């Protein structure tokens, strides 16, 4: 019976949690859940100079927000005893040795000199792995057959001291002791794999199966990086901007993978069922924010219908006043036909763009805008007539369709633009807004009649 997979997501807390890291976590999560396996979070904080608690917190908070729950969590810095044990084993067995280093300033700048790296600093001693100088090969589950001549790696550093292991040693020991069966990570780690295979062989650790997923690229096909693309590469940015976690998960899943059909919207449950590493593409995946915005709008509209807490809690209280749940959902459906994120809604409501949907809100009018279709007298005539028609309709049947059926005969007789333009402006005060029948249904008969009266009074006095 084949062993159930154990995978790990191993981010370094050295900066804001990158969307590329989130996709790597997602692919590990989907693979583990699909196969009844285990998903481990391992925070790789061996780089003490660059690792910060706030970034570790950002990783954990972002995974929680995305709904990617892990079965176990570890901090690499807490595992020093295990790392030290295997370092000593490697030295004792002759697979590694304590190397006397010369200060960088004493060495001529030529190939082959063992100058201290950024990780080792100007140390007099480090621990180096004794490279057997051979070729290593593995069958990558995404990239296919890969072979690498390790001779060019020379004797590489695996620790600053017995108490200070570096990345490659710590990764191999932890993968071994945690029983990791599959290493699913970004393709930028392909160059790390030969070193790690050599260390695995030296400590008699089984080799996990590797799957290196393609990088996420910007629209210009450059690598998506904070240095070039700013905060928009972080998960926290999309949370702050009012994207739903379900939308971001759906979007990230399709970066470099698809189910093989035309389906574009998939829940986590559907992704778990359909995900397959063999369908992950080899080339880089373009981060198309327009596609993400479209997905987010679809998920928000879906969330409105399902009373999604995250969506409904973003609605200002004034929009809820005088409306039952059904009426509020109808209002939000109209709003998010145009907007794509919750932050856009917050910004536009703060700027007063949607004030016309707030019951009892006084509308500011502009006479030129009201009378753009006709002169003042004709505009007054048509607004007064529209008000009379609306008053005849009972509240219980005041819907977009019922209002349209009553007003349209008059509009067709007098000219649609001559009626519908001033009617819409009188209801919204805006040059651009939803059609007047949609607004009428959202604000109700009483509010509509009050606004038409106010518009008529404004024109008479201006």
Image: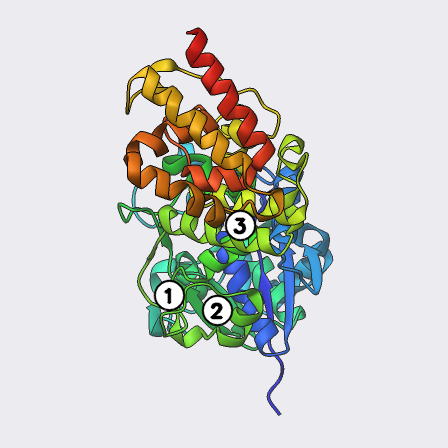
- Residue 451 lies left or right of residue 89; in this view the side is left
The residue to which callout 3 is attached is: 300
Q: CA distance from mark 2 to mark 1?
A: 9 Å
Q: Residues within 10 Å of mark 2 (few under 14, many from 20)?
A: many
User: Does the image show residue 59?
Assistant: no
Q: Which residue is farthest bottom?
A: 1
CB atoms of marks 2 and 1 within 8 Å: yes
> What residue is shown at x 49% (from left), y 31% (from top)?
388
Numbered circle sitting on residue 422: none
Q: Residues within 10 Å of mark 3 (few under 14, many from 20)?
A: many
Residue 84 lies in quadrant: bottom right
- Residue 433 lies left or right of residue 312; in this view the side is left
Examine the rendered structure and indicate whether residue 21 appears above or below residue 457. Answer: below
Q: Earlier in the sequence, mark 2 or mark 3?
A: 2
Q: Position of residue 169 (x, y in %)?
A: 57, 59
Q: Position of residue 18 (x, y in %)?
A: 50, 46
Q: Earlier in the sequence, mark 1 or mark 3?
A: 1
Q: Position of residue 29 (x, y in %)?
A: 58, 66
User: Does the image show residue 439?
Assistant: yes
Mark 1 or mark 3, whichever is nearer to me: 3
Q: Which residue is farthest top?
A: 462
Examine the rendered structure and indicate whether residue 252 appears above or below residue 431. Answer: below
Numbered circle sitting on residue 198: 2
Numbered circle sitting on residue 150: 1
> What residue is shown at x 63% (from left), y 75% (from top)?
37
Residue 448 or 248: which is nearer the viewer? Answer: 448
Q: Quadrant of the C terminus?
A: top left
Examine the rendered structure and indicate whether residue 284 appears above or below residue 358. Answer: below
Secondary structure state at the residue bearing disc 3: helix
């Amino acid at each position: 019976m084949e062993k159930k997979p154990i995978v790990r997501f191993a981010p370094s807390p050295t900066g804001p949690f990158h969307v590329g890291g989130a996709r790597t976590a997602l692919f590990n999560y989907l693979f583990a859940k699909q196969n009844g396996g285990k998903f481990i979070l391992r925070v790789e904080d061996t780089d003490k100079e660059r690792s910060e608690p706030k970034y570790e917190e950002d990783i954990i908070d972002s995974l929680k927000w995305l709904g990617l729950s892990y079965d176990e969590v570890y901090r690499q810095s807490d595992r020093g005893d295990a790392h030290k044990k295997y370092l000593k084993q490697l030295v004792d067995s002759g697979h590694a040795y304590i190397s006397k280093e010369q200060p960088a300033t004493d060495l001529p700048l030529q190939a082959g000199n063992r100058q201290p790296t950024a990780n080792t600093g100007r140390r007099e001693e480090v621990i180096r792995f004794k490279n057997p100088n051979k070729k290593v090969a593995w069958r990558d589950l995404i990239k296919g057959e890969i072979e690498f001549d390790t001779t060019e790696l020379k004797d590489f550093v695996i620790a600053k001291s017995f108490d200070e292991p570096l990345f490659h040693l710590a990764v191999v020991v932890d993968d071994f002791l945690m029983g990791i069966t599959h290493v699913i990570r970004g393709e930028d780690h392909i160059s790390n794999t030969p070193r790690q295979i050599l260390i695995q062989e030296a400590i008699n650790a089984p080799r996990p199966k590797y799957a290196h997923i393609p990088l996420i690229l910007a629209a210009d096909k450059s690598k998506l990086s904070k240095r070039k693309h700013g905060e928009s590469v972080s998960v926290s940015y999309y949370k702050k901007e009012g994207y739903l976690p379900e939308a971001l998960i759906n979007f990230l899943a399709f970066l470099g993978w698809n189910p093989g059909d035309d389906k574009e919207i998939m829940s986590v449950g559907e992704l778990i069922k359909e995900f397959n590493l063999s369908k992950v593409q080899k080339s880089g995946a373009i981060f198309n924010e327009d596609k993400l915005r479209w997905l987010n709008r679809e998920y928000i509209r879906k969330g409105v219908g399902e009373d999604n807490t995250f969506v409904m809690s973003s609605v200002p209280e004034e929009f809820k006043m005088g409306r039952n749940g059904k009426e509020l959902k109808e209002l939000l459906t109209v709003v998010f036909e145009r907007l794509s994120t919750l932050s856009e809604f917050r910004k536009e409501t703060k700027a007063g763009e949607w004030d016309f949907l707030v019951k009892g809100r006084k509308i500011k009018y502009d006479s030129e805008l009201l009378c753009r279709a006709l002169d003042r007298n004709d505009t007054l005539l048509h607004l007064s007539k529209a008000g009379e028609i609306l008053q005849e309709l009972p509240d219980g049947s005041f819907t977009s369709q019922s209002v349209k059926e009553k007003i349209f005969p008059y509009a067709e007789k007098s000219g649609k633009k001559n009626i519908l333009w001033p009617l819409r402006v009188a209801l919204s005060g805006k040059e651009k807004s939803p059609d007047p029948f949609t607004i009428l249904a959202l604000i109700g008969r009483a509010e509509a009649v009050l606004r038409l009266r106010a518009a008529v009074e404004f024109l008479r006095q201006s």
